[in-house]
Image (cartoon, helix red, strand yellow):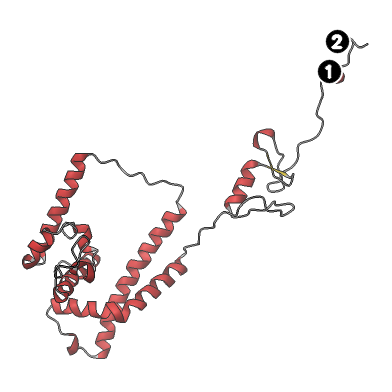
């Protein structure tokens, strides 16, 4: 019988002489601290496998057995895609909305669309389309950058009651200033007495139908604004944005 003193070391301790496996993704040795075994039995670095999964590869790199659900892959919003989307959007709106918008702006500027020849009309529309294209491309680029930097979380500041009250006061002041700037006193009482339209952000992002019948407004009542009045207000809103984009306050 072998006593503890007489037993050889190899009989007391089991020595694992099997070498580390290599990760076929990076070809480095797989240590116990960074090891992942798939259901098919193949081993990889956990970090390599995770990176592989993020790239929407849901199969084993060796045997191609599906080991998990495929990660949805985000589209590549590159400059070509941005321009295509913007062009399609702008030219789709060209006849339906852009030309009437230009006519309303010209009317507000005491200009008559009918007095211009076809070349002049084309040049005016072209300038307006270019303006929208530049705006759309710039916005698309910003969105693309935000997607690429998606690992950085947006931290929204916490607001207390005083800040909320201050925001409401600013909204009211912005609306008052807008009405005064564009001489909309005849509409002031209806705008300011409506909970939805009295909010400046709501007002400048509205459309004709919403101006006529804002959210919460009874459909049984007459429209808050007639269609002509709504068209006039929308023209003012478009003029406001045009001046912001061009930096022209005249």
| SS at circle 1 | helix
How far separated are the C-alphas under marks 1 and 2?
8 Å
Give the left or right position of residue 99, taking residue 49 as reference.
left
Counting from the top left corner in percent of width and height, residue 189 is at 7, 62
Residue at 17% in and 60% down: 197
Q: Is residue 162 above or below residue 184?
A: above
Q: Is residue 104 above or below residue 61?
A: below
Counting from the top left corner in percent of width and height, residue 116 is at 20, 88
Question: Any mark on residue 4, and which?
Answer: 2
| SS at circle 2 | loop
**Is residue 180 in view from this perspective?**
no
The one nearer the camera, 140 or 63, is: 63
Question: Any mark on residue 37, and which?
Answer: none
Q: Is residue 182 above or below residue 68?
A: below
Give the left or right position of residue 84, taking residue 201 as reference.
right
Q: Are marks 1 and 2 in contact (CB under 8 Å)?
A: yes
Looking at the rendering, in which quadrant would you find the N terminus? top right
Badge 2: few (under 14), some or many (20 or more) residues near its Cα, within 10 Å?
A: few
Residue at 30% in and 80% down: 96
In the figure, residue 250 lies in which quadrant? bottom left
Image label count: 2
- Farthest residue toward the right? 1
The one nearer the camera, 2 or 49, is: 2
**Is residue 207 in view from this perspective?**
yes
Give the left or right position of residue 30, taking residue 213 as reference.
right
Counting from the top left corner in percent of width and height, residue 224 is at 14, 67
The one nearer the camera, 79 or 168, is: 168
Question: Any mark on residue 12, and which?
Answer: 1
Counting from the top left corner in percent of width and height, residue 23 is at 71, 44
Q: Earlier in the sequence, mark 1 or mark 2?
A: 2
Residue at 12% in and 54% down: 173
């Amino acid at each position: 019988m072998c006593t503890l003193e007489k037993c050889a070391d190899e009989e007391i301790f089991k020595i694992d002489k099997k070498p580390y496996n290599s990760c076929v993704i990076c070809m480095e040795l797989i240590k116990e601290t960074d090891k992942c075994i798939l259901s098919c039995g193949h081993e990889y670095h956990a970090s390599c496998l995770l990176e592989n999964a993020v790239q929407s590869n849901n199969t084993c790199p060796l045997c191609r057995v599906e080991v998990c659900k495929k990660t949805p892959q985000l589209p590549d919003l590159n400059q070509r895609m941005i321009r295509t989307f913007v062009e399609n959007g702008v030219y789709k709106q060209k006849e339906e909305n852009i030309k009437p918008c230009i006519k309303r702006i010209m009317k507000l500027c005491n200009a008559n669309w009918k007095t211009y020849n076809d070349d002049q009309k084309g040049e005016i529309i072209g300038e307006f389309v270019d303006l929208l294209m530049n705006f759309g491309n710039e916005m698309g680029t910003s969105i693309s950058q935000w997607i690429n930097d998606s690992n950085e979380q947006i931290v929204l500041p916490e607001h207390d009651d005083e800040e909320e009250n201050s925001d409401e006061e600013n909204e009211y002041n912005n609306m008052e200033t807008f009405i005064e700037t564009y001489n909309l006193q005849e509409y002031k009482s209806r705008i300011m007495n409506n909970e939805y339209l009295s909010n400046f952000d709501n007002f400048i992002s509205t459309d004709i139908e919403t101006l006529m019948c804002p959210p919460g407004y009874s459909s049984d009542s007459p429209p808050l604004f007639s269609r002509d009045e709504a068209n006039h207000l929308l023209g003012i809103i478009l003029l406001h944005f045009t001046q912001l984009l061009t930096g022209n306050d005249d």
